[in-house]
Amino acid sequence: MAITLSDEVVRNAIDTAALTRRLRGLRRRSRIKALLLVAPLMLFLLSVFVLPIGLLLTRSVDNSDVSLALPNTATALSSWSSEHAPDEPLFAALAADLKASSRERVAEAAKRLNNYESGIRSSLLKTARTIRKAEAPYQPAFVEADPRWATPERWAALKQAMPRLTDFYLLAALDLQRDEMGRITGVAPENAVHLDVLIRTFVVSISVTLSCVLLGYPLAALMARSTGWVANTLLILVLLPFWTSLLVRTSAWVVLLQSRGIVNSALIWLGLLDPTQPLELIYNRAGVLIAMTHILLPFMVLPIYSVMKTIPPVYMRAASSLGAPPSSVFWRVYLPMSMPGVSAGGLLVFILALGYYITPALVGGPRDQMVSYFIAYYANQVTNWGMAAALSAILLVAVLVLYALYNRLIGIDRLRIG
Amino acid sequence: MSAAFSFNRIVAIGLWVVGGGTALFLIAPILAIIPLSFNAEPFFTYPMPGLSLRWYNEFFSSEVWKLALRNSIIVAVFATLLSTVLGTLAAIGLSQSDCPARATLTAILISPMIVPVVVAAVGIYYAFAAVGLLNSLTGLVLAHTVLGAPFVVVTVTAALSGFDQNLMRAAASLGAGPVEAVLRVMLPLIAPGVASGALFAFVTSFDEVVVALFIAGSEERTLPRQMWSGVRETLSPTIAAVAALLIVFSTLFLATIQWLQGRAELQKTHREE
């Protein structure tokens, strides 16, 4: 008995293949265990966050409204080209669709068709009302309802709207469109609003990031060289706003920046301002920049401060003792060593600023609203999911590219809070 | 030498002026709004004609504000519970030495911190409309859990990076099952990290307005949602009173977080000794 046992022990010890197999099995089990722990949050996030955003984004290229409402017309148009005049089979197909599809469906399709020819919406709805009661041949009934039905251009517009996928919204988000020949051109100047909004979003975010660097760097440096209660007090002065509700800080600025608010009163009291001409500080670009800089500043100060704290002061002393004048000590030693903090804070502030909505909406004027405002506008006020989704896609791509860059340069595990 | 000395003086004074000025810029608006909430008149200007508590009275006697406060607390409590449980489990999974694709998984789990909240809000609005979760506190709790959980993942992962995994092996060798080992060995040691994560999740929900704007109806209005209407429609000093209350609240939160982080530091140094 004892002999067989020791035999087995020896055999097991020698049988490295079996051992490796067992080890691999164990590792697989512990890998599965780790994944099982991550799974609940991952599944939750996929269903309440990733999937909803994904579904929204499909709306930016989705064009099935028209072909779902008018399936027969879609088939008839596929063998028709705009050199020919519209003939009775086309009219019959559209008539069959208008009779078969529900009014809501036709209304959705009509709304969508208006993107391809302005005025087609009311024309189609009016035509649908007469056609539902009409009998074959349909062509005269259509032309009587709206003479445009006799033109090939009208049917060309319908044909253009038939594919299930469209680049219409993504192009429109960049102020582009396709002409009758399918070439990409700019939209009419009076409709070109989106590019302006995208550029504005970028300009405001860059300005806020730069002012955060200019204000945040000296403050972080001051914090890093202070000790004791001074350092603690400064840290609290940075952390308290960081912890205070965004809406509290924004409403504080709304109150302070009024034309008869505290900022103006103080300037008048100091004699720096003519009492009859207070500064316009709110509902304009100045207000947006002041409030956003204030709100995002802690995200700049904290990363710079944490990097500066790790720079040993002996480096600067070594540089001076080797004869470097104070300015080169700063430019050639201190600044390069603190740059990782500046790039971390700068990227973070820029990423966050790109998506800002609440603060510009409350302290900005109509000309200061950023892309988030227009996403909310298209989704909430005019229910244009295609435009809301296309602008979301552009904003999301910009942010994710910067996020990847952040991950590459700084490392996502360095993303610290508080 | 004396030139360098005076240059250093100038730099120090300059730093104090610019850095100190920036620190004042950070704190001034928060401090300036508090006295205005005690103004006897419905204006936002100094000097104030007299002091009164009428705006606080208005807040605590208004049905709309009381409902908003109640909704905010309910939603924040449930969202905190959910995101703390899910986030802590995920962080424990991510900290296993055998966890595959850790970087990718972490990047996805943390993405709600980075994705613009309007995009998330419109997406959630679009999806919740299809499944009937609009205008419900449940929908709000689910959405806020998504936004709060990444903070728990980050803080608990940080706490676990200082946790000695050998302790789990020791517990197992002494006969503890995996669940018992987590509950009785790991959790007590990473408790400050879990608690900070929970606080972050609570504040995230309590402060969230964009998702609430989209998916909450008038019955589910939260405190920030009500403030948003207040600032946009009738700017009354009641807003200042609510702001002052929330500032007191966030000061308490900050103090708690500092205390928790102090405890975590203390634990670390104890272990290293």
Image (cartoon, rainbow, N blue to C red):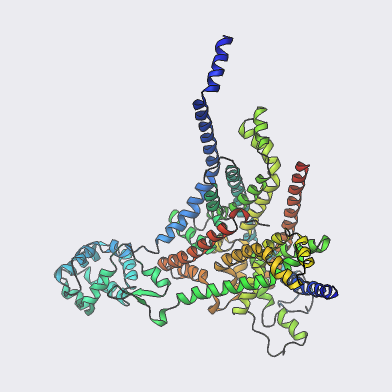
Give how far across and how far down residue A329 sits, in percent.
Answer: 74, 69
State the residue at coordinates (71%, 77%): B44
State the residue at coordinates (45%, 59%): B126
The answer to which image quadrant residue A86 occupies is bottom left
Q: Is residue A278 left or right of residue B97?
A: right
> Is residue B19 among the parts visible in the rendering?
yes
Give how far across and how far down residue A306 sits, in percent.
Answer: 70, 59
- Using the image, determine if residue B185 lies above or below residue A83: above
> Is residue A360 among the parts visible in the rendering?
no
The answer to which image quadrant residue B184 occupies is top right
Closest to the observer: A231 or A367? Answer: A231
As drawn, the residue found furthest toward the top would be: A1
Q: Quadrant of the C terminus of chain A?
A: bottom right
Give how far across and how far down residue A410 sits, in percent.
Answer: 60, 58
Closest to the observer: A221 or B179? Answer: A221
Q: Is residue A387 left or right of residue B167?
A: left
- Using the image, determine if residue A145 lies above or below residue B259: below
- Using the image, determine if residue B161 lies above or below residue B12: above
Give how far across and how far down residue B209 sits, in percent.
Answer: 58, 63
As drawn, the residue found furthest toward the front would be: A322
As drawn, the residue found furthest toward the right would be: B2
Closest to the observer: B220 or A402? Answer: A402
Closest to the observer: A361 or B89? Answer: B89
Q: Quadrant of the N terminus of chain A?
A: top right
The number of numbered discs placed on residues in the rendered structure image is 0
The answer to which image quadrant residue B28 occupies is bottom right
